């Protein structure tokens, strides 16, 4: 088994690889940029002995699939990373990729290019020490996680069903805690149709869509139930044209999060049954659940406990917790399959121009990943 000091000696290589990835800007909606990042990942994985395939996509960046053989020809590890970020091209000039005070700054450094760097350098360490994972490793680098994983979800679910353990290299909680639960995530749009009229000469003939939407906003927000972990947030409202016209249309975009299984169905049933309060208006509702909940189940805790034991052998104290944010791990958990989420680095500033990852987290996570790949006991 590797020691933590073995990966401390690889700190410079970990930082160097991460810098290359961060400096390849890759916003989700820029296929050319994400594909450029994909070519870099494919090149690095190929140099480490992986069999690399490109899963071509028309509407988003291509997904990269890298496979390494293991000692046993049995269902092995699926490792999930995503290449896309929320940051537009040019953010690198505002948050340059620099190392300072034990932190590596840069757009996407934490979410989640650190995960890709950790994986690649861990596989390099195994290769240079003539070690093989106990079972085959399949690494999937996706291009659309930040925008819902619409194109990658079928591939994620297929590969997870073929694997014995899924590792999600998303960022960890503060201090390195793994994520043993996540909320399910969804969104929907409420569109209200009214009737336009002159606000002065013909006001009584109008049907104010914004007035109706105001009623619906209050009803939607009231569905929040903190005890159940259910939240609804009306985050965007649009409506009307000018102040002297009764608005004919208004719309709201709503984010909702659920923790308990069955809550999504309850919320969606209520939303799809909304009735207008203002006579002469009508309502449309579009949307649904994007990521199912990832509950803290007995299987989740059994999997975490084994990882915690391996961390202890490295001298690391591994904890667990949860978050309201979703990941591709939600899809795997919904299939009832074992996974470890939050296996990437930790830091601060997710989705902001102050984003950074702590350098020591790269070292600790690479050591833990190596231990899992070489010593994991499958059920």
Image (tube, grey):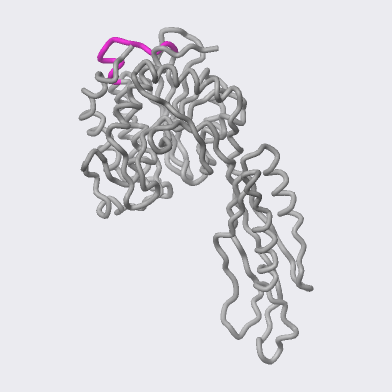
The residue drawn where x is 29% and y is 27% is: 363
- Across and down, in percent, residue 225 comes to 66, 49
Name the residue furthest right: 279
Residue at (55, 24) in percent of width and height: 301
Magenta stretch encompasses residue 309: no
Residue 30 x, y percent position in the rendering: 39, 49
Q: Taking 135 as reference, is 226 above or below it?
A: below
Residue 103 place in picture, x, y as percent = 26, 40
Relative to 2, is 188 above or below? below
180 horizontally vs 43: left or right: right
Q: Is residue 138 left or right of residue 253?
A: left
Split into 4 quadrants, where in the image is the N terminus? top left
Boundaries of the magenta span? 124-135
How many badges with numbers are in the image? 0
State the residue at coordinates (66%, 86%).
Answer: 198
Residue 66: quadrant of the picture: top left
Q: Quadrant of residue 192?
A: bottom right
36 relative position to 343: left or right: left
Q: Please tell me which residue lies in front, 34 or 305.
A: 305
Q: Which quadrant holds residue 68? A: top left
Q: Residue furthest top?
A: 72
Q: Is residue 339 placed above or below 136 in the rendered structure? A: below
Q: Nearer the viewer, residue 212 or 25?
A: 212
Residue 125 within the magenta-colored segment of the rendering: yes
Task: Work out which quarter of the rendered image holds the C terminus and state it.
Answer: top right
Q: Nearer the viewer, residue 25 or 4?
A: 4
């Amino acid at each position: 088994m590797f020691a933590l000091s073995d990966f401390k000696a690889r700190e410079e290589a970990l930082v160097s690889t991460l810098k290359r990835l961060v400096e390849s800007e890759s916003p989700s909606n820029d296929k050319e940029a994400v594909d450029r990042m994909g070519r870099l990942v494919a090149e690095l994985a190929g140099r480490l002995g992986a069999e690399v395939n490109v899963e071509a996509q028309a509407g988003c960046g291509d997904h990269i699939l890298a496979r390494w053989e293991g000692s046993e020809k049995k269902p092995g590890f699926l490792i999930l990373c995503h290449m896309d970020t929320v940051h537009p091209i040019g953010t690198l000039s505002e948050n340059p990729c620099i190392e300072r005070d034990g932190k590596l700054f840069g757009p996407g450094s934490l979410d989640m290019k650190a995960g890709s760097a950790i994986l690649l350098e861990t596989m390099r360490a195994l290769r240079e020490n003539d070690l093989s994972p106990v079972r085959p490793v399949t690494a999937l680098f996706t291009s659309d996680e930040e925008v819902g994983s619409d194109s990658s979800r079928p591939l994620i679910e297929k590969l997870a069903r073929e694997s014995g353990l899924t590792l999600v290299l998303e960022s960890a909680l503060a201090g390195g805690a793994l994520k043993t639960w996540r909320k399910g995530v969804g969104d929907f749009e409420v569109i209200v149709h009214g009737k336009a009229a002159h606000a002065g000469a013909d006001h009584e003939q109008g049907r104010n869509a914004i007035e109706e939407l105001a009623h619906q906003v209050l009803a939607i927000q009231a569905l929040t139930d903190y005890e159940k972990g259910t939240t609804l947030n009306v985050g965007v409202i649009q409506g009307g044209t000018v102040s002297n016209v009764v608005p004919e249309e208004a719309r709201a975009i709503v984010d909702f999060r659920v923790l308990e299984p069955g809550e999504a169905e309850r919320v969606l049933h209520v939303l799809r049954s909304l009735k207008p309060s203002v006579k002469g208006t009508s309502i449309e509702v579009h949307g649904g659940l994007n990521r199912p909940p990832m509950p803290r189940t007995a299987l989740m805790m059994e999997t975490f406990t084994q990882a915690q034991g391996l961390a202890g052998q490295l001298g690391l104290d591994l904890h667990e917790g949860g978050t309201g944010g979703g990941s591709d791990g939600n899809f795997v958990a919904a299939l009832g399959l074992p996974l470890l989420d939050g296996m990437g680095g930790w830091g601060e500033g997710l989705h902001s121009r102050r984003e950074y990852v702590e350098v020591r987290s790269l070292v600790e996570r690479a050591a833990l990943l190596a231990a899992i790949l070489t010593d994991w006991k499958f059920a």
